């Protein structure tokens, strides 16, 4: 099982952009680099507040989409056969 701290941000960005091609790549990278790891369950509101204060150029709607896809990527990465 993969530790969320060990997730590759480049692979996460590629996954997110493939799932949500209308998202701006700069927005995806802003969320990933600002947070570093996907927020723990129940911590999305805090993550969105942090993003809003640090990156006011990132719309909350877009940030929520990035977070949703980032968690999906993390769940896939945690599966034992992901890298096989």
Image (cartoon, grey):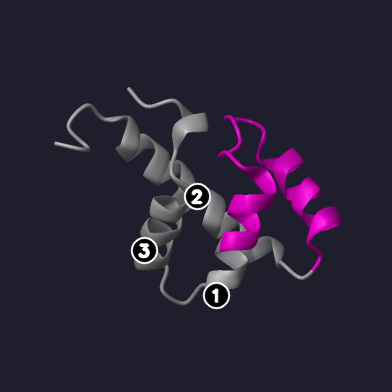
Mark number for residue 38?
none
Mark 1 or mark 3, earlier in chain: 3
In the picture, which quadrant includes the N terminus? top left
Which residue is painted at 22% across and 37% down in the image?
A: 82
From this viewpoint, which residue is outermost toward the left? 84
Label 1 Cα crowd, 10 Å radius (few <14 / some 14-19 / many 20+): few
Residue projecting furthest to the right: 53
Q: Is residue 55 magenta?
A: yes
Q: Is residue 11 left or right of residue 54?
A: left
Residue 20: where, in percent of width, then height? 42, 67
**Image x and y of residue 18, in percent:** 35, 66
Which disc is residue 24 wearing?
1
Drawn side of residue 42 relative to residue 78, left or right? right
Q: Earlier in the sequence, mark 3 or mark 2?
A: 3
Where is mark 3, residue-wise? 19
Residue segment shown in magenta: 29-56
Q: Could you tell me how far apart the alpha carbons at marks 1 and 2 are, in whole angstroms?
A: 15 Å
Mark 2: give few (<14), some (14-19) or many (20+) Cα within 10 Å.
Answer: some
44 on left or right of 2: right
Residue 68: assigned label: 2
For the residues labelled 3 and 2, the Cα–Cα distance comes to 11 Å
Q: Residue at position x 71%, y 67% from top?
A: 58
**First-in-chain label (1 vs 2):** 1
Q: At which x and y percent is residue 64?
A: 60, 55
In the displayed structure, 18 sits above or below 67; it is below
Most foreground residue, 77 or 20: 77
At mark 2, the secondary structure is helix
Which numbered disc, 1 or 2, marks the residue closer to the eye?
A: 1
Left or right: 38 in relation to 20: right
């Amino acid at each position: 099982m993969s530790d969320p701290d060990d997730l590759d941000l480049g692979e996460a960005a590629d996954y997110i952009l493939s799932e949500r091609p209308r998202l701006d790549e700069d927005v995806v990278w802003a969320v990933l680099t600002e947070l570093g790891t996907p927020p723990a369950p129940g911590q999305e509101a805090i993550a969105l507040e942090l993003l809003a204060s640090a990156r006011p150029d990132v719309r909350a709607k877009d940030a929520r989409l990035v977070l949703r896809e980032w968690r999906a990527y993390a769940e896939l990465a945690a599966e034992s056969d992901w890298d096989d």
